[in-house]
Structures are given as structure tokens and as C-alpha cells.
Amino acid sequence: MEAKLCEENRVADDILDCPEDGLHGGEDEVENEDTTQPEEDSPELNLDQKFLKTVLEHVRHFVSMAGKPAWQIAALDCVTTCLDLLGSTPGQLPGEKQETILPLVHQVWQPLHLLFKSNNIFVVEKAFRCLRVIGEHARDFVHKRTVTDVLPPLLTFFKSLEIMVKERHKQKTLAANQSRRILAEMVSGLWDLLVLLELEPLETDPLIDLLVNHIKDKEGGGGDTTSFLKPKRSLDANILQLKLQHPITS
């Protein structure tokens, strides 16, 4: 009887004895398994997105062919169209993840921003159209880059166009006519770009100052600048009005 009692006490002690490692390791593992979230896989691209992505990856290399302006212009048209179409597909809209379009914009940006230093006015015109599309679909990505990489050479380009338009002996040449056309389109597009990128006053001031002081109207013959300079934001309109009322003489 006494031996049986001792055996029962020993079994009870074994049950109550907690090992050094504890008895809760298994529960912790189960809890960790429950709280660990599997990583979300990127959604598979649809056929349109795959096609546009493939085209962009191949055509973007021709944008930097400085010795072949015709190839550059054709490549810029293709890149601009593909980015615009891709930016309208599921998952690539502003505010969404944009896991496909943003890397492609990053790849295109390096050769694109260098084109604003080109001497070919038609190449710069196409590059500006591409910039507007990128600004529409990837504003946050190109905001700072536009201010630092594009606006300085763009100011220089506007000045060269203004000189081309104003030189009397060239006013009836094809170059002068094309310069007037490009100048008018780019100034109109510039106001749209300021809206898309939401540029600050200190960033827009040099552009507006140049437009007021160096570009009188789209025909280059002087006159009322307000018929040519039509800002889309009240902020830009206020800066323009201030400069028109208090012009800076050089």
C-alpha cells in the first residue's frame, strides 16, 4: 500500500514538474504561424500591359541616339504613346501601386532629360510632350527631377526659340515658322505642366519671368502678352500679373 502511494506521488511530481524550456513552445510556434502574413505577390500583367512593357523596354534605347534625330523622334512618339496607354491600365493609375509603369519611367528618364539640351527643336518638342505625359502619370517621381534636370535647359531653349522668331531676316523661313509653332505649343503646355507637377512659386518664377520678358506674343511681334500667356492656376496668374504690372528692365 505504501509503495503504491509513493508511485502515485512520483507520477504527480513528474506531471507538475515544468521543464527548463517551458511547456509553451508549441503554442508560441502556432501563434507565430497565425500572425505571420504571407507576402502579396504582384498581380500578373495582362496582355496589353505585357505588350506595352516589352515595346518600352526595346524602344527606349533609341531615344539617346544623338546622331539619328529621325530615330529619336520616332522613338519618343512611341514611348509617349506607350506610357500614356500603360498609365491607364489597372494598377498603374496615379494613387495605385504602379509597380510596372514607375520602373519604366525611371529607365526612360535618363536619356529623356538630356534631350532638352539638344540643338534640334523638333527633338526638344517631342521630349516636352513625353514629359507632360510622364507628369500626368508619375507626378511624384518627376517633380524634383523636372525642377533640377529640365527647367534650366528648357529656359535656354525658350530663349533660343525667341531669338529665332524675332530675327527679321529669318522670319519667313521654315525654321522661323516652325519655331513660332513650337513656341506657342510649348508655352501652352508649360502651364499644364505647372499644374500637373504642382510647382511652388520659387520654381515657377524663373519660367514666368522669361515668358514675360522675352516672349511678347506667339507671332513675335509685340503686343498684349495676356493673349498669349494664359496660366491655368491662380498662383501662376498672380505671379504673371505682378510681373506685367512691375516689369523688370534689364
Image (cartoon, rainbow, N blue to C red):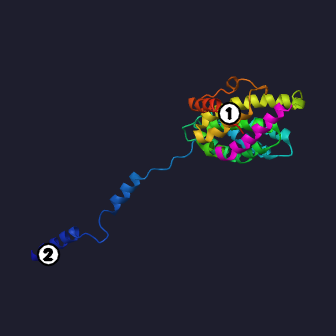
Choose between 40 and 209: the one closer to the eye.
Answer: 209
- x and y percent of residue 82 in the render? 70, 36
Which amino acid type is shown beneath numbered disc 2?
Cys
Q: Residue tagged by mark 2? A: 6
Q: Is residue 151 magenta?
A: yes
Direction from residue 152 to residue 138 in the image, left or right:
left
Q: Secondary structure at mark 1?
A: helix
Residue 98, horizontal then vertical, whole percent? 59, 41
User: Which one is nearer the viewer's eye here, 129 or 221?
Assistant: 221
> Where residue 54 appears, x then y in whole percent?
72, 42
Instruction: Give residue 194's quadrant in the image.
Output: top right
Residue 100 visible within the image: no
**What are the residue bounds of the magenta stretch?**
147-167
Q: Is residue 122 magenta?
A: no
Q: Is residue 107 above or below residue 134?
A: below
- Residue positioned 28% across, 71% down in the render: 19
Q: Amino acid at mark 1?
A: Leu
The mark tally for this picture is: 2
Mark 1 = which residue? Answer: 190
